């Protein structure tokens, strides 16, 4: 069995650690945050991601997992003309904090080292031998998994500087204590899409008392001057004044101290996900724009596919090649789909029929 060091204890890192432990490997996770990395709000999980979560728990009881099922999607224009009304597969809306806590609870050997910010590798005969952290600690392993998210430093170490695309769309993401809406819209994802320019608001109940919602906007129309809660509130009030009453209610009920500004961007597909004995997974390996709402599902699917590949062979180079072969087409397609959907979002009048993305 191999000694494996995972850098980044987010969704991909924790899920991979769990599956590797099930296979009997010796695994450590090094995470920069000092406690649970629970920043962020919530996301939609596709059935493929839910399947991996069930596999992690070895449990077929869906209710064991955190989150609320989302079985229906209602799309309206900004003037509340219904554009779409369809069933989903179903998906689940899960708060990031709940999912991280859930994954932490499954790591049996407590080999999670917090407060470790990855700095660089030390190499021997071309292979990484040690991961070095800024606090001076080091981790030796047979191979290393970079699961350190969209701004991955492991990626920089392996492939050099990443050229990210410019941020053309931002998202204000909020979780609002709003039992009335949580009850009324249970199981339903409601979205209001401006059909003339780049603005959209979507909301979904994430618990019995809370609703997750986002305001997605074209930064060339207007942008926030700063990220102070009051600035965000005024920005939403001003730029969504012509949106339906539901949106006005969400703004007035929300505590903007807890809101999060997401600057969306991506990068071109990588030619490989590994170099020698270092492999990237999750957002570190491939980043699609949020329009595909696939980031978390991809992180979980990567964990499952990589660990399946490692179970099939004792040669991890073969496993890494196989992992790339199995995953790169799908994640590359999502990167380009994300870009196409962004273009439609920014210039809806140039399209006869909009493929309106869910998120
Ligand atoms: C507000 C918001 C809303 C989102 N909504 C959706 C959605 O609706 N649907 C969806 O599918 N996805 C969504 N996402 C994206 C989703 O959260 C990520 O795509 C997904 O979590 C990827 O998992 P990951 O493990 O690769 O990265 P992350 O979950 O970001 O984990 C990376 C981890 O690495 C740690 N780390 C970073 N750098 C270092 C370092 N140098 N050393 C050590 N540790 C490090 C971080 O602290 C973090 O814990 C959203 C993201 C945000 C922020």
Image (cartoon, rainbow, N blue to C red):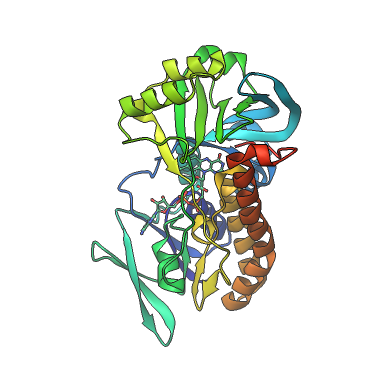
Up/down of 30 relative to 314, above or below: above
Whether residue 66 appears in this view of the structure is: no
Up/down of 315 relative to 237, above or below: below
Q: Position of residue 280 (x, y in %)?
A: 51, 65
Which residue is pictured at 65% across the width and 62% down the height?
A: 327
Q: Quadrant of residue 350?
A: top right
The answer to which of 258 and 170 lies nearer the viewer is: 170
Q: Position of residue 121 (x, y in %)?
A: 36, 73
| Count of numbered labels shown in the rendering | 0
Which residue is pictured at 45% across the width and 22% down the height?
A: 176
Left or right, 145 with reference to 130: right
Name the outermost residue toward the front.
350
Q: Position of residue 90 (x, y in %)?
A: 71, 34
Quarter the C terminus occupies? top right
Whether residue 157 appears in this view of the structure is: yes
Name the outermost residue toward the bottom.
125
The answer to which of 166 and 69 lies nearer the viewer is: 166
The answer to which of 90 and 25 lies nearer the viewer is: 90
Q: Quadrant of residue 43?
A: top right
Left or right, 291 with reference to 31: right
Name the outermost residue toward the left.
136
Up/down of 19 relative to 292, above or below: below
The answer to which of 123 and 19 lies nearer the viewer is: 123
Q: Position of residue 23 (x, y in %)?
A: 58, 61
Which residue is pictured at 60% across the width and 57% down the height?
A: 302
Left or right, 318 with reference to 29: right
């Amino acid at each position: 069995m191999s000694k494996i060091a995972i850098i980044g204890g987010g969704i991909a890192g924790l899920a991979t650690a769990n599956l590797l432990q099930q296979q009997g490997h010796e695994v450590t996770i090094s995470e920069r945050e000092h406690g649970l990395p629970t920043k962020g709000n919530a996301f939609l999980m596709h059935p493929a991601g839910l399947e991996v979560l069930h596999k992690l728990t070895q449990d077929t009881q869906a209710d064991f997992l955190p989150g609320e099922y989302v079985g229906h999607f209602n799309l309206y224009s900004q003037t509340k003309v219904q554009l779409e009304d369809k069933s989903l597969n179903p998906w689940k809306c899960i708060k990031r904090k709940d999912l991280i806590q859930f994954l932490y609870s499954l790591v049996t050997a407590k080999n999670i080292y917090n407060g470790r910010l990855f700095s660089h590798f030390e190499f021997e005969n071309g292979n990484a031998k040690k991961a070095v952290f800024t606090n001076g600690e080091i981790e030796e392993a047979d191979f290393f998994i970079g699961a350190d998210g969209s701004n991955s430093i492991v990626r920089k170490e392996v492939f050099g500087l990443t050229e990210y695309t410019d941020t053309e769309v931002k998202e204000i993401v909020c979780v609002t204590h709003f039992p009335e809406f949580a009850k009324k819209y249970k199981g339903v994802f409601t979205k209001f899409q401006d059909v003339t320019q780049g603005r959209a608001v979507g909301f979904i109940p994430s618990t019995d008392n809370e609703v997750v919602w986002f305001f997605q906007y074209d930064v060339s129309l207007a942008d926030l001057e700063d990220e102070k809660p009051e600035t965000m509130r005024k920005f939403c009030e001003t730029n969504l004044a012509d949106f339906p009453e539901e949106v006005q209610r969400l703004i007035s009920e929300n505590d903007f101290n807890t809101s999060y500004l997401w600057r969306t961007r991506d990068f071109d597909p990588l030619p490989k996900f590994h170099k020698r004995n270092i492999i990237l997974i999750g957002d570190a390996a491939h980043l699609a724009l949020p329009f595909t709402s696939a980031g978390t599902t991809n992180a979980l699917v990567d964990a499952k596919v990589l660990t399946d590949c490692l179970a099939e062979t004792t040669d991890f180079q073969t496993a890494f090649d196989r992992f790339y072969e199995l995953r790169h087409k799908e994640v590359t397609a999502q990167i380009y789909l994300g870009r196409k959907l962004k273009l439609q979002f920014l210039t809806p009048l140039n399209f006869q029929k909009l493929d309106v993305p869910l998120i």
